[in-house]
Image (cartoon, grey):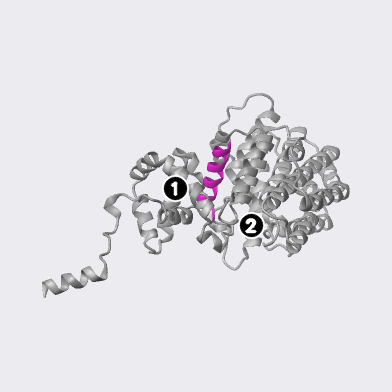
Amino acid sequence: MTPGKAGWLTVLLTEAIASHQPERDLAQFAQEATGSRRARARAFLRWALRESGLLYGTPATSQDAAPSGRGREEVLFLAVMRTFARVALDITTLVGAPPGPRREQLFVLFAAFSGLFDEAAAADERLRQSPSRMPSRRAWSKVEAALEERALSLSGDPAYGLVLHNGALYADAQVFGRQAIDYFVRGTFEAEGGKRRFGLAAQQKALLVEVLTALWCVESTPSYSARRAILRQIEDLRLPAKLESSLRERVKRAFEKQPRLEQVVKGVRSRDMRQFIVAQTLLASLVDGHRSPQELAFIQELSTALYVSPEERQRIEVGVAEFYAKNRSVVDVFTLAPRAEVMGEQMVESIQRTAEKNFQRLMQELRETGELSLLLTKAARGHKLTDEEKRKMRAQLIDVAKAIPALAIFAAPGGLLLLVALAKVLPFNLLPSAFQDEPEEPAVEKERKRGAAG
């Protein structure tokens, strides 16, 4: 199964159906939601997007989903498509959809997801007339080509552009899931509803572009290369023409003058959307390994504008960190910049104050997390950790972050690097005395002792 080779979508959907285990996925979902089938399905979708990793733009998959010889972009694209299919199949079980040609029904959803509403409607009509009638080979090829075009946006964000991949993928996953709910509850594909959901996802992406552009501009005016990259990213999103045109104009104005965040996010109403924007902004602020005072002030202002409390923001950050610490088998979308190894003085001072304020709690957590102190000592001394040791350290850093949300940054991607660097500049030693090196004697003292011994 290789994108670009005819029939890859057929193979992917066939394999997804064959490996589908609804009892596994739905058993993990706390089915406490009440109400209609739609209400229960929407609650499941929120849970599934978070648990699958689509909320953060990197789906968690098993190791066999990443065979050798494939580039990470292809692996990520196929993982996303598989996860979409699995979520849709779980929804069929949850809403009690009658048995049917699931592969062809999934084709209808992927056609609508690609914006090919006529093809989706035609395929659905054929299935309702006769469940054994498959979409034409031409229709399959057209949908495959459209999906491959969209896959370009999964290849990563440009060096000078916005951290846009994660949020754009979440918007896509959300609209795909909602379309699946409507399709399997209704029993037919409704094109106008599909177009409205498609438009909603486009609006979410446009809003994300505005917020992340504002974050970029908070420190300095973007360079010519950065402006070009950001405008190209807008083009790659393939938004409706009118929306794309207005977004480009707003972004160009933001390059020259920082917009008021209250105006940018004034249309946001839902709690899920507020949390989504804050999570994506936190991700973008972490990508280069540090947060400047201007970025921290921006995040605070944004949270206030979205009515997200400091406590809620810390919970979001811990959740983001926990997912990325546990699921890196497909792709690590964070590219930790070399400058993260030498943090700015302001960043060090900020984290130092936080660590000092929580010193007693931090020491207690270090004692209770077993190997963490030992592993930190090994890393601080410059010894290379094994993959298993890194895995253990990430897991235990997550435990510390859960206990002390203010230190969640240490559990985020690059957090180990930050913690080790911080340990070298703090006025106290984070490591228990049993793990500390004996202070090295000056050379003169060593010579004196040798002479005395001789």
Q: Is residue 115 magenta?
A: no
Asked if residue 452 shows in the view, the reply is yes
Contact flag, marks 2 and 1 (Cβ < 8 Å): no
Image height of 187 relative to 329, above or below: above
At x 68% / y 58%, what residue is drawn? 157
Q: Is the N terminus in the top left, top right, bottom left or bottom right quadrant?
A: bottom right
Residue bounds of the magenta highlight: 313-328
Name the residue tied to disc 2: 76
Residue 229 coordinates in the image, percent (x, y): 75, 60
Front residue of 101 and 71: 71
359 lies left or right of 338: left
Q: Quadrant of residue 69?
A: bottom right
Residue 224 coordinates in the image, percent (x, y): 76, 63
Between label 2 and label 1, give the one nearer the viewer: 1
Label 2 residue SS:
helix
Residue type for callout 2 = Leu
280 lies left or right of 232: left
At x 26% / y 71%, what residue is drawn? 443
Residue 76 coordinates in the image, percent (x, y): 64, 57
Asked if residue 95 shows in the view, the reply is no
Image height of 48 relative to 443, above or below: above
Label 1 residue SS:
helix
Front residue of 53 and 270: 270
